[in-house]
Image: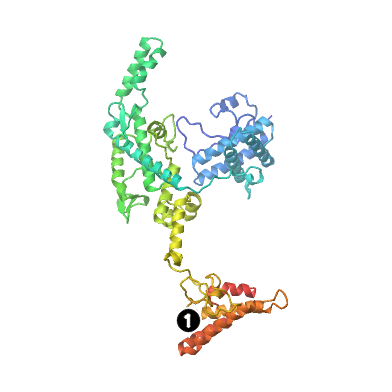
Amino acid sequence: MRDLNIPDLTFPIVTYGRMETPWDLRTLLYMGGAKTSPRTVFNQIAAGELGRPIVERIDLALRLHEAINANLVGGGSKRTASSILKPLRCFFGWADAGGHPLSLETVEAKYRYWCDFLLHRVRLREIKENTAYSMAVAVSSVLGDALDRAQSLILTTRLRSPKPGSRAVGIAADKQNLADTFAFGHLCLDVIESTPVEAIWGRLPLRIRIRSGRVLEQWSYLIPPENLAALKPGYKNKSHFERALRKRAAWEADRTLRTRFPLVNLRLEAELLVFMAQTGKNLAQAHQLRKTQFSYKSTIDGYEVRDYKQRRQGEVLFEIFAEYRTHFDRYLAWRDQVFAGEPTDRVFPFVRQKGAAESTAPDFDQLRRRICTSSGIPFVGPQKLRKTRVNWLLRQSCDPDQTAEMDQHTKQTLLRIYDQPSLQRAQVEIIQFWRKCDPRLGGDPLPCPAPGVCDGVPKAIPDLPVEASKPDCTHPAGCLFCDHHRDIDSEDYVWSAASMRHLNTLILAGFRPVKKGKADAARHVELAIEVLTAKLKWFRESNHKRKHWVEEAMERIEESAFHPHWRHLIESAEGV
């Protein structure tokens, strides 16, 4: 058999860490390659343990590679692409285990079988419903791009998005959420205040004093002395234990980033979360921010931070509140001292371990595991912190446009994703509405349904005809027979009254009695026309100015130029 020409299926655009395995979709071409560890799969391929590549999969793998690469070139994040690769390998691993052939022609049908397999596992309680759906959606998205489908593949399967829980937040839960966020913010500030440069390079342990009175000792990956005695029996002899003690002493004496990076990363995690809470930037933007010469331009409630240029100021990097500038400048001074001589220009230069790439976002393991767990304060991650900030700003300002602008996304995104309904806020808004609109609670009356004004309290006129519409503040005809209804001495009022009369004439012309002998059923419409005619007659006969108003209104009616309040109703009655 001739050698196959396998295309390059790597991703040169992705930046990898020192010990990170580069992505390569060629593993999908071999039977069993998808389930083999990425670190050893190419050694097995070279040794022939996985056989020859499957020819039918080459075009499919090439299309998948083009779809993922196009997303990266278009600005997609590395984390998003990585979240697609694992479910894609699971899909190909399932096909290998079951002997399902995969190609451009068969992949859609096999994908639906795989979704049925995931649904079966959900019913057996082997995996959760959210897990199955998220895996299927990831593969569906890349297959849709690869096959140029107009409809998402997931919609053709029996998997459905799990129903979300109730989004409404009760008063107690809402207050607890804010309380946890504020407590976590105070904890971050306590960490920052306890980690000056002198403490970072000083003697171990570093002591973090939190405002509850507790003191947390940080040994920078060293075992606390009180635990050393328990480790002594584990060594073969005394010399081995003494050698371990010497290594420990050398680690403690070495006051560089090599040994003190856990303490530095702890401070950086706290500073990054405070920065995100103050600026509203998301994690992907904030942790990759580059350090330049910052210049501050004062605004109404804070500063615009720009990249300083010799002749002109650069573009706005982010905005901060006035109170945060002092803290941010103090942090930059701390950062310059700790990383003096280090080849990094990042504002938050985390010390990476195990060869992780600088572009990888921090996981906040130091703050979560070593501080929050020990202090008993819930950890508030970047996503929850950002959502809490958005909802707090929205609640304080009651202005979705301003809040969306402050948090750098559209109003639609704010209301669809970030806005979290609050029972307490809803109750306040309902009370404010009725206090404003209900006359019985001292508020302004609702607009009168008919032309004119009223006080919002319906009261029938004396000797109200039986056939007339009863005043109820909802039906326009009822206002004509209300004792509190008042005319307005304006041309717009005359135009509106003439338009209402025209609407009632159309209703009367189209009226058909349901039964014989029920001709008086339309009497309420006739009475409304009579009242409106009388009003127009009074305006016509009162003086020359009002007469002109009536004549102008009647000409507009003849030209089908109806008042905006009645235009749509009239067009509907005319069948337009």
- Report the number of discs: 1
Q: Is residue 50 visible?
A: yes
Q: Position of residue 152 (x, y in %)?
A: 62, 47
The residue sitting at the right extreme is 516
User: Residue shown at 55%/29% (left/top)?
Assistant: 38
Label 1 element class: helix
Q: How is the image coloured?
A: rainbow
- Front-most of 117 and 297? 117
531 and 207: which one is in front? 531
Q: Residue furthest top?
A: 237
Q: Is residue 560 visible?
A: no
Where is mark 1, residue-wise? 491
Q: Residues within 10 Å of mark 1 (few under 14, many from 20)?
A: some
Kind of residue indicated by mark 1: Glu
**In front of the other: 430 or 274:** 430
Instruction: Indicate the quadrant where residue 49 lies.
Output: top right
Report x, y in % for residue 452.
48, 76
Tell me the quadrant of the picture where the N terminus can be found. Answer: top right
The residue that appears at 49% across and 52% down in the rendered structure is 413
Instruction: Judge left or right: residue 303 versus residue 485.
Output: left
Q: Nearer the viewer, residue 433 or 118?
A: 433
Image location (x, y in percent) of residue 369: 41, 32
Q: Give the farthest residue toward the left.
A: 198
Q: Can you say whether 413 is above or below 216 in the image? A: below
Q: Residue at x 34, y 13 (%)?
A: 242
Q: In the rendered view of the protein, which quadrant contains the C terminus? A: bottom right
**Residue placed at 34% from the left, 31% from the top?**
263
Dividing the picture into quadrants, the one containing residue 264 is: top left
Q: Residue 541 location in percent, x, y?
A: 50, 90
